[in-house]
Amino acid sequence: MKLKSIMVAGIVDDIRRIFQVLTEQSRKIEHKTNLTGPQLWVIKILKEKSPMKVSDLARRMYLHPATMVGLLDRLEAKGLLKRTRSENDRRVVFIDLTVQGCELEINSPEVVQNLLVSGLENLTGQELKNISGGMEQVVAILGAKDIPPQLIMSAEINAPKRRRKIG
């Protein structure tokens, strides 16, 4: 029974550590950039590779395209990025940083979401399966299975907007 108690304490402490890193990093990002973590993550990805299609950026961030559009709207309103329609296919939109967006990225802190995704992508299939199973159990314990996933330290929800039924 003692081993079980030690393991529970370790898991709870690890969850506390995760929240601590997320909170501290989010405060640092907002203080230095006036952006949310997800917004800065967009800037950092575009700095690495742009112009980029909206769909490719959404895939890279593991976000639903509708969520991506909301993030891009806010960044474009701040003058940090610009969108350009493809001349070959008007449905395709490319995103690129503005000079202001590039300058903001230079002195910005690391984004915890990028660390998380990069770290997870480097794991083996079995390691991912183990983490996934454990996370599913934690979500079930907390009764959070049906809660739409909110972006880390942001009000954005990663889900398509629901359409009203007509008729």
Image: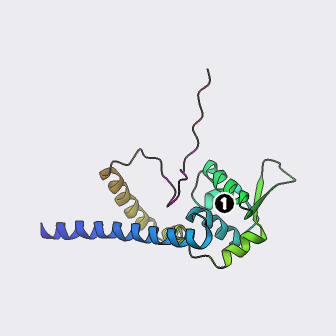
Is residue 107 something that shows in the picture? yes
- The answer to whether residue 122 is magenta is no
At horizontal 41% and vertical 44% (from top left) the residue drawn is 146
Position in image of residue 19 (x %, y %):
40, 66
Q: Amino acid at mark 1?
A: Leu
Residue farthest along the left direction in this orientation: 1
Position in image of residue 127 (x %, y %):
41, 67
Q: Main secondary structure of the magenta part?
A: loop
30 left or right of 4? right
Label count reads 1
Residue farthest along the bottom direction in this orientation: 107
- The answer to whether residue 155 is magenta is yes
67 left or right of 17? right
Is residue 55 something that shows in the picture? no
At horizontal 45% and vertical 67% (from top left) the residue drawn is 23
Q: Quadrant of the C terminus?
A: top right
119 left or right of 58? left
Q: Is residue 133 above or below residue 3?
A: above
Position in image of residue 132 (x %, y %):
40, 59
Q: Is residue 30 above or below residue 132?
A: below
**Foreground: 152 or 58?**
152
- Is disc 1 placed on a helix, strand or loop? helix
Magenta range is: 149-160
Residue farthest along the right direction in this orientation: 87
Q: Quadrant of the N terminus?
A: bottom left
**Foreground: 50 or 78?**
78
Rendered image quadrant of residue 79: bottom right
Residue that numbered label 1 is attached to: 57
At horizontal 72% and vertical 75% (from top left) the residue drawn is 103
Residue farthest along the top direction in this orientation: 167
